[in-house]
């Protein structure tokens, strides 16, 4: 699922001659992404998390800068920036509290396998210290 979330998506934001799509239609394209990017007046490239139902969003996220993987307990995405909340932060010795906001611009989807592997690595690191 996480790889599908990273496929380029483009939203039609302006009409053009010969167009048969409705304004607001979202197209998922790998092969022709460069074509859509040439016509930014007509197509807006969406971030992996933008304009999706919560049911489509991943249960696990990886912080791009650190590589840390977190389990998502719920999402809140406003119009300006994406934010997710997780209750897993405390297990990693960071901030206290049941939910902590994060910027989705700094995250990428992760899998359950990656998450479980990261927890195992944390446990191993705790045991050796």
Image: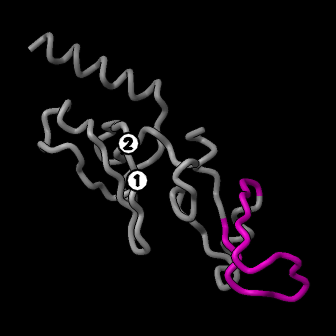
Give me the disc on residue 75: 1
Q: Going by the picture, which residue comes out furthest to the left?
A: 129
Residue drawn at 73 percent across, 71 percent down: 25
Dot 1 crowding, Cα within 10 Å, few <14, some 14–19, many 20+: some
Residue to which mark 2 is pinned? 72
53 vs 2, nearest the viewer: 53
Residue 71's place in the image compared with 39, above or below, is above
Residue 85: assigned label: none
Cα separation, mark 1 vs mark 2, equals 7 Å
Quadrant (top left, top right, bottom left, bottom right) of the N terminus: top right
As for residue 12 lying within the magenta part, the answer is yes
Percent across and percent down for residue 76 are: 39, 59
**Tag 2: Cα neighbours inside 10 Å, few (<14), some, or many (≥20)?**
some
Residue 40: x percent and y percent?
64, 80
Secondary structure, mark 1, is strand
Residue 30 versus residue 121 in the image, above or below: below
* Tag 1 near tag 2, CB within 8 Å: yes
Q: What stretch is highlighted in magenta?
A: 10-31
Q: Where is residue 119 in the image (x, y as percent from the top left)?
A: 30, 23
Q: Dot 2 lies on which element?
A: loop
The residue furthest top is 128
Q: Is residue 62 magenta?
A: no
Most common SS among magenta residues: loop
> Which residue is depicted at the point 31% across and 50% down?
85
Which quadrant of the view contains residue 104?
bottom left
Judge from the rendering whether residue 25 lies leftward or rightward of residue 111; answer left or right: right
- Image quadrant holding the C terminus, namely top left
Q: Residue at x 58, y 48 (%)?
A: 56
In x, y percent, where is residue 83? 35, 59
């Amino acid at each position: 699922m996480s790889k599908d979330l990273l496929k380029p998506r483009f939203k039609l934001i302006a009409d053009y001659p010969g167009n048969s799509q409705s304004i607001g239609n979202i197209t998922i394209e790998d092969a022709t992404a460069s074509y859509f990017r040439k016509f930014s007046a007509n197509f807006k490239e969406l971030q992996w998390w933008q304009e999706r139902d919560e049911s489509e969003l991943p249960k696990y996220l990886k912080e791009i800068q650190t590589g840390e993987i977190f389990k998502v307990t719920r999402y809140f995405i406003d119009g300006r920036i994406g934010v997710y909340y997780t209750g897993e932060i405390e297990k990693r010795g960071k901030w206290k509290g049941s939910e902590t906001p994060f910027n989705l611009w700094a995250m990428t989807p992760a899998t359950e396998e990656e998450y479980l592997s990261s927890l195992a690595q944390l446990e191993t690191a705790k045991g050796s210290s």
